[in-house]
Image (cartoon, grey):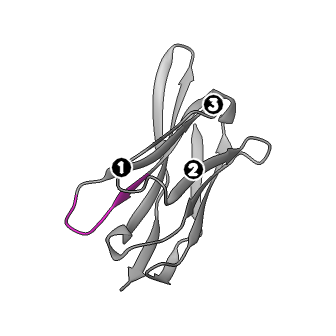
Amino acid sequence: QVQLVESGGGFVQAGGSLRLSCAASGDIFSIYSMGWYRQAPGEQRELVATITRDGSTNYADSVKGRFTISRDNAKNTMYLQMNSLKPEDTAVYYCKVHSSMRGFEYAYWGRGTQVTVSS
């Protein structure tokens, strides 16, 4: 089992910045990929960015050049630095990890943190 707790969401004006954190606990040794997703009201949950154990990253086109995903393995924490925020970035942001243990694959979600960007 892996437990995830997001933090860092809030209210910001367009053009501002926020940094989200996702702290992992439990069977963290089994985690091989982590990522951020978001879901706006009335919309489907979508990928924002992912990062693998070796540090390879992937971003949605809508956030490239503005958001940066990173991880601190010593702190078992993943981050999402969000700059130049736009109103369309308003959503609940979720942390997700993929783990592998004893030949089985697992996915875990955090409970989410709200990000609101005003115009």
The residues tagged by marks 2 and 3 sit, at their Cα atoms, a distance apart of: 12 Å
Residue named by callout 2: 69
User: Disc 2 vs disc 1: which is toward the camera?
Assistant: 1
Total labels drawn: 3
| Residue wearing tag 3 | 53
SS at badge 2: strand
With respect to residue 73, does 117 lie above or below? below
Q: Quadrant of the N terminus?
A: top right
User: Which amino acid, by three-letter code, is at mark 3?
Assistant: Arg
Tell me the residue at 45%/56% (across/down). 94
Magenta region: 37-43
For the C terminus, which image quadrant? bottom left
Numbered mark located on residue 61 in the image: 1
Query: How far is mark 2 from mark 1, CA to CA?
Result: 14 Å
- Relative side of 114 to 83, left or right: left
Point out residue 5 in the picture as x, y percentages from the top left corner. Answer: 59, 57
| Quarter of the figure with residue 56 | top right
**Is residue 57 on the magenta stretch?**
no
| Mark nearer the N terminus (2 vs 1) | 1
Q: Mark 3 or mark 2, which is nearer the start of the sequence?
A: 3
Task: Point out the residue furthest to the front here.
Answer: 65
Neighbour tally class for label 2: few under 14, some 14-19, many 20 plus, Cα within 10 Å: many
Which one is in front, 92 or 86? 86
Amino acid residing under circle 1? Asp
Of tags 1 and 3, the one toward the viewer is 1
Camera-side residue: 52 or 107?
Answer: 52
Q: Is residue 96 left or right of residue 102?
A: left
Classed neighbour count for the residue bearing mark 1: other residues with Cα under 10 Å, few (<14), some (14–19), many (≥20): few
What residue appears at the point 55 percent right and 73 percent down from the top-left corner? 17
- Kindly identify the amino acid type of the residue bearing the numbered disc 2: Ile
Judge depth for marks 2 and 3 and give the one in front: 2
